[in-house]
Each structure stands twice: as structure tokens, then as C-alpha cells.
């Protein structure tokens, strides 16, 4: 018989000590693997959350770009619809506005000597009587 066999047969302590050490080793290995699994699961979850947030940021950036484009289109449409030609055409069609071929601004040229005797009463008298009643301001009925 060899020494090992003799030690085993002589006392059972060697076997129990070895079994206790192996048990502790297995528990430590199990705890380490559980910790490693939890860390990997946390890392995967963190990566997924980061990817999700990046996607949301890109969606918000696209939405901002779309809103800016819509705002620019609205500004172009506003400028087009509020131009003088469009407003005058709509007023002629919808309100029956009659526009004359007169220019927008009328300039009156005065000689230097005529400026001294120009006054508001005299100008109003030259224009003729003005009827400021609401019926007169509304214009002729159609």
C-alpha cells in the first residue's frame, strides 16, 4: 500500500478537508459567475439604453429640421399671400375694389412763392365739400 492509501485509510479527515475546500471553491466559483453574469447583463442593458436614447435624439433632430422647413415654407407662403399684387387682386375680386391707374404716391410741386399762401382751409376749399357720414364713406350701393 502506498502512503496515500495509508493516509486515506488511517484517517477520514483528509477526505473531509478536501471536500470542504472543494465545496468552498464551488461556492466561490458560483458567486463569481453570478457576479459576472449580472455585470454583463447590466452592460448589455446600459448599451441598449444608450442606443435607444441616441435614436430618440436623432428623431428629435429630424423633427426640428422638419419644423424649420415647414416654418420656411410658411414664411414663403405668407410673403406670397401678403404681397401687394395678391392683396389688390383679392380686394378687387372679393370686395369689389375699383383701383385707378394712379400711382401710389402723388407729388405736388409748388413754386417757392406759392408756398407762403398755402394753408389747410384753402386746400380743403380747393378739394370741395367732404361728406364724412358713414353712408357716404361706404360708397355707392350696387
Image: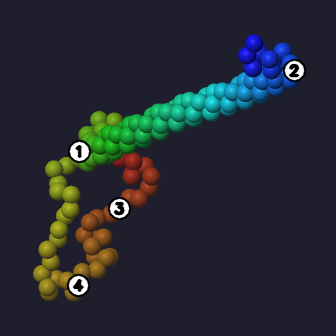
Tag 4 residue: 117
Tag 1 residue: 85
- The front one of 92 and 142 is 92
Which of the two discs, 2 and 1, sits closer to the camera?
2
Q: Which mark is residue 11?
A: 2
Query: Which residue extends farthest front?
Result: 1
Q: Earlier in the sequence, mark 2 or mark 1?
A: 2
Mark 3, Cα crowd under 10 Å, few <14 / some 14-19 / many 20+, is: few
Q: Earlier in the sequence, mark 1 or mark 3?
A: 1
Q: Position of residue 7 (x, y in %)?
A: 80, 20
Q: Which mark is residue 130?
A: 3
Query: Which residue extends farthest top?
Result: 1
Tell me: residue 30, above or below residue 93: above
Query: What's the distance in space between the residues labelled 1 and 4, CA to CA?
Result: 40 Å
Query: What's the distance in space between the residues labelled 4 and 2, CA to CA?
Result: 142 Å
From the viewer's perspective, is 26 left or right of 59?
right
- Secondary structure at badge 1 equals helix
Query: What's the distance in space between the residues labelled 2 and 1, CA to CA?
Result: 114 Å
Amino acid at each position: 500500500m502506498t502512503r496515500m492509501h495509508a493516509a486515506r485509510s488511517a484517517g477520514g479527515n483528509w477526505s473531509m478537508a478536501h471536500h470542504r475546500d472543494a465545496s468552498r471553491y464551488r461556492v466561490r466559483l458560483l458567486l463569481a459567475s453570478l457576479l459576472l453574469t449580472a455585470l454583463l447583463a447590466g452592460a448589455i442593458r446600459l448599451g441598449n439604453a444608450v442606443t435607444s436614447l441616441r435614436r430618440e435624439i436623432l428623431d428629435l433632430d429630424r423633427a426640428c429640421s422638419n419644423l424649420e422647413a415647414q416654418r420656411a415654407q410658411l414664411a414663403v407662403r405668407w410673403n406670397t399671400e401678403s404681397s401687394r399684387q395678391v392683396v389688390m387682386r383679392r380686394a378687387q375680386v372679393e370686395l369689389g375694389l375699383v383701383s385707378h391707374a394712379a400711382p401710389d404716391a402723388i407729388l405736388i410741386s409748388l413754386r417757392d412763392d406759392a408756398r407762403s399762401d398755402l394753408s389747410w382751409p384753402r386746400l380743403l376749399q380747393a378739394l370741395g365739400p367732404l361728406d364724412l357720414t358713414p353712408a357716404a364713406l361706404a360708397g355707392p350701393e350696387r
